[in-house]
Amino acid sequence: MCRYRGPVLTVTTVNVNGLRAAAKKGFVEWLAETSADVLCLQEVRAEPEQLPAEVREPEGWHVVHAPAAAKGRAGVSLYTRRAPERVQIGFGSTEFDGSGRYVEVDLPGVVVASLYLPSGEVGTERQDEKIRFMDEFLEYLKGLRVRAAAEGREVVVCGDWNIAHQEADLKNWKGNKKNSGFLPEERAWLGQVFEATDGGYVDVVRELHPEVEGPYSWWSYRGRAFDNDTGWRIDYQVSTPGLARNAVKAFVERAATHTERWSDHAPVTVVYDR
């Protein structure tokens, strides 16, 4: 059964924090109810054969899994109601294409990608890796926009970007100025993604919610971060301007209570009326 609704495209992105664990805590039920046409997952942390059938190949979906070569780490997936016209795993990087951090598909009029950008940690190799990824990926984004335009397609790159761009994107910004995820150089890089003269992409959720704190999409499991809404907005839908102009609604599917969460992230959904 195909539920793709033609000109209206609903896209959801969520870091599942381990898909096998999420499947046991409510993801399967959520998937059965979602109205999304496209679903982008990050931090799947499983080989396809390790997943239960109802999430590996659920009825009504075409699924692409891109696990990491390092077992139990990273991993991204894309679920689409329509069969993709083209599938690509990785972005042409010798270092990162086997790391389970990027997958994209072509659909009618749009390229959709699921991204899991490295998280980093100041003063460690993990942060150096994050910077290398960012440098390569920005160049890829520029080329992707050109290629897609030549084919008459828009682009939306969804996922866990692991950077809060502005002070409004995390509750405790003053206490995180020296931490990975809110470093000046990371924020400047994301600014480049959004610069018309550089990356030329749009932060769709912020475009629709310009004057609000958040809406946050990640809350630590420590303490009462979720209950107090002490969160970060690090899960983005980043699109080319033409698609962003057609975004009519964006929202975070925040669980009603802490115990109802099936991930430390919440799904971020955007409705595009093309």
Image: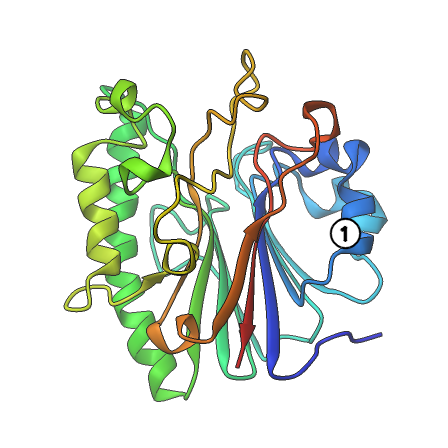
Name the residue rendered at 33%, 52% in the picture.
94
- Residue 168 position, x and y percent, is 33, 38
- Residue 121 position, x and y percent, is 31, 23
- Residue 64 position, x and y percent, is 64, 60
Q: Is residue 151 above or below residue 122?
A: below
- Is 199 left, or right, of 96 in this rendering? left
Q: Is residue 251 above or below residue 259?
A: below
Name the residue rendered at 17%, 38% in the picture.
185
Q: How is the image coloured?
A: rainbow
Using the rendered image of the protein, determine whether residue 265 is visible from the camera's viewpoint: yes
Question: For the residue marked with disc 1, what is the amino acid?
Answer: Leu
Name the residue rendered at 64%, 34% in the picture.
18
For the image shown, how many numbered marks are present on the structure?
1
Name the residue rendered at 61%, 77% in the picture.
8
Residue 61, by quadrant, is bottom right
- Is 128 left, or right, of 241 in this rendering? left
- Is 120 left, or right, of 237 in this rendering? left
Say which element carries label 1: helix
Question: Quick one: quadrant of the N terminus?
Answer: bottom right
Residue tagged 1: 31
**Residue at far front of view:** 211
Q: Is residue 129 above or below residue 209?
A: above
